[in-house]
Amino acid sequence: GVYTVLRVELETTTCSNSTTEPATSDRVAATTTVDAQLWGAHFHLDRLERSYRKWWTTTTPTTTSLDCWEDDDDNGGDDDQQQQQQQQQQQQLSLDLKRARHESWQVLQHLLKDAAAAARRHQLPNDAPSTTTMTTTTTTTTTTLMVTLLWQPASTTIRPIQVRGHILERRPPPSDDETTSPSL
């Protein structure tokens, strides 16, 4: 099969209003919004399509005449039939690629929806101060995610191209302060 890797920046903004009063418990109202910036999606899907088409043409055997011992004059009908079969295969491949492209968008949307839900779950409002105050806090976090899409042949004719995807958070390498052990 063929694959591509896309970069996604997930920006999570949490705005929280907290009220702390000595006689009552803290009240926190927070709203979290998540925006995803998917870089070069059309470029990557075009590249997947071109790569799969090239891969398919190099791995799929072409239809050949079974009787190679006949005279060239007798093979005229076989050549026409072979061309028709190749055209049908190409037309079917084009339909399959269109379906795979549509399915890729669905996979991307599903992965980004799950990533956004996870980002919302992990954004907790800051601790409220201990005196009676009204505090509004806005926190914005940007996370870089890498999405891999894989197209591979499937064993079914209903969906001949199987589309798979997964998402991974890209973390920067640790800084020097994080890698050195404390001095004794």
Image (cartoon, rainbow, N blue to C red):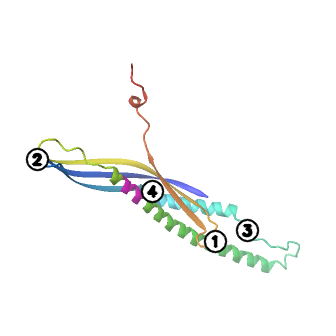
- Looking at the image, residue 124 sits to the left or right of residue 85; the answer is left
Q: Quadrant of the C terminus?
A: top left
Task: Please identify the quarter of the rendering in which residue 152 is found.
Answer: bottom right
What secondary structure is found at the residue carrying circle 1? Answer: helix
Please tell me which residue is depicted at 69% across the width and 61% down the height of the picture.
Answer: 59
Disc 1 vs disc 4: Cβ atoms closer than 8 Å?
A: no
Looking at the picture, which amino acid does disc 3 mark?
Thr
Q: Which residues are magenta?
A: 112-118
Looking at the image, is mark 1 or mark 2 nearer the viewer? 2
Q: Which residue is mark 2?
A: 23
Q: Which residue is mark 1?
A: 90
By secondary structure, the bulk of the magenta-drawn segment is best described as helix
Please tell me which residue is depicted at 42% across the width and 25% down the height of the picture.
Answer: 181
C-alpha gap between disc 1 and disc 3: 11 Å
- First along the sequence among labels 1 and 4: 4
- Looking at the image, residue 130 sits to the left or right of residue 48; the answer is left
Q: Give coordinates of residue 96: x percent, y percent.
A: 58, 70
Task: Please identify the quarter of the rendering in which residue 56 is found.
Answer: bottom right
Disc 1 vs disc 2: Cβ atoms closer than 8 Å?
A: no
Q: Which mark, by number, is residue 62?
A: 3
Q: Which residue is mark 4?
A: 40
Please tell me which residue is depicted at 57% across the width and 64% down the height of the picture.
Answer: 162
Foreground residue among 117 and 140? 117
What secondary structure is found at the residue carrying circle 2? Answer: loop
- Looking at the image, residue 79 sits to the left or right of residue 168; the answer is right
Quick one: label 3, few (<14), some, or many (20+) residues within 10 Å? few
- First along the sequence among labels 2 and 4: 2
Q: Relative to residue 24, is residue 51 depicted above or below?
A: below
